Amino acid sequence: MSANSYSGGAVMEVFAILTFLTVVFLFVRSRYLASPLSEFETTSRREYLIRAGEILQEQGYQIVGERIPHELASFFGNRKFVTYIVVDYLVEKEGVHYPIKVRSHRDPARVSGAWLRKQFLALYSLYESPIGYLSPESGTMEFVDFDIDFPGRYYTKRWRMRLLWFAIGLSIGWLLSFAH
């Protein structure tokens, strides 16, 4: 056996061990040493969030959570799409929890119904409470609420109202029958 063939095998063994250690390191780093979301945000975005937290506390809200991500899975045929919805703050006031989105410089100046639906409907379905939309520049917060109508809802309400009026009329007629 020559010295060159032995050193080539040793080089391959060292290369295999280094590759294995690199893969293990990358797995452990991505799995257990994940850095928080705030590390990747621009400084101005973090400053907006800090100012928004101060405004919320000044307005009497208790901050329950910050930067809460929610995984949302959508299915289209046999394909699965996963996206994340992040709530900037979850606050509580008078026993009610409100998700809060902080206005970004990328948000449009003029709000439309389609934009509200795209930005807030998923959050509304998660929390089933109005979503606060806070503007740190002006210090104002407005709530976005949805009233979802479907045809069966009105028919059910009509039946209830008709039954109520029928019962009221029946009881008035019964009381009038004792008056004579």
Image (spheres, rainbow, N blue to C red):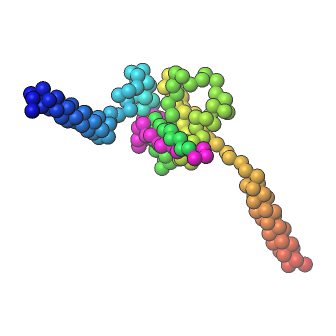
Task: Identify the residue at image location x=84%, y=75%.
Answer: 174
Give the left or right position of residue 170, taking residue 77 as reference: right
- The percent coordinates of residue 112 (x first, y second) are 67, 29
Q: In which quarter of the view is residue 41 placed?
A: top left
Residue 61 drawn in magenta: yes
- The percent coordinates of residue 171 (x first, y second) are 81, 72
Give the left or right position of residue 75, taking residue 13 as reference: right
Q: Is residue 116 visible?
A: yes
Q: Nearer the viewer, residue 32 or 54?
A: 32
Q: Quadrant of the C terminus?
A: bottom right
Q: Magenta-highlighted stretch: main secondary structure?
A: strand
Q: Is residue 129 visible?
A: no
Q: Nearer the viewer, residue 68 or 161?
A: 68
Residue reaching furthest to the front = 1
Q: Quadrant of the N terminus?
A: top left
Q: In which quarter of the view is residue 46 placed?
A: top left
- The percent coordinates of residue 118 (x first, y second) are 61, 35
Label count reads 0
Above or below for 47 versus 93: above
Magenta region: which residues? 56-78
Give the left or right position of residue 164, taking residue 49 as reference: right
Task: Identify the residue at image location x=54%, y=44%.
Answer: 80
Give the left or right position of residue 50, taking residue 120 as reference: left
Task: Identify the residue at image location x=57%, y=42%.
Answer: 122
Task: Identify the residue at image location x=56%, y=25%.
Answer: 107
Q: Nearer the viewer, residue 159 or 5?
A: 5
Residue 60 drawn in magenta: yes
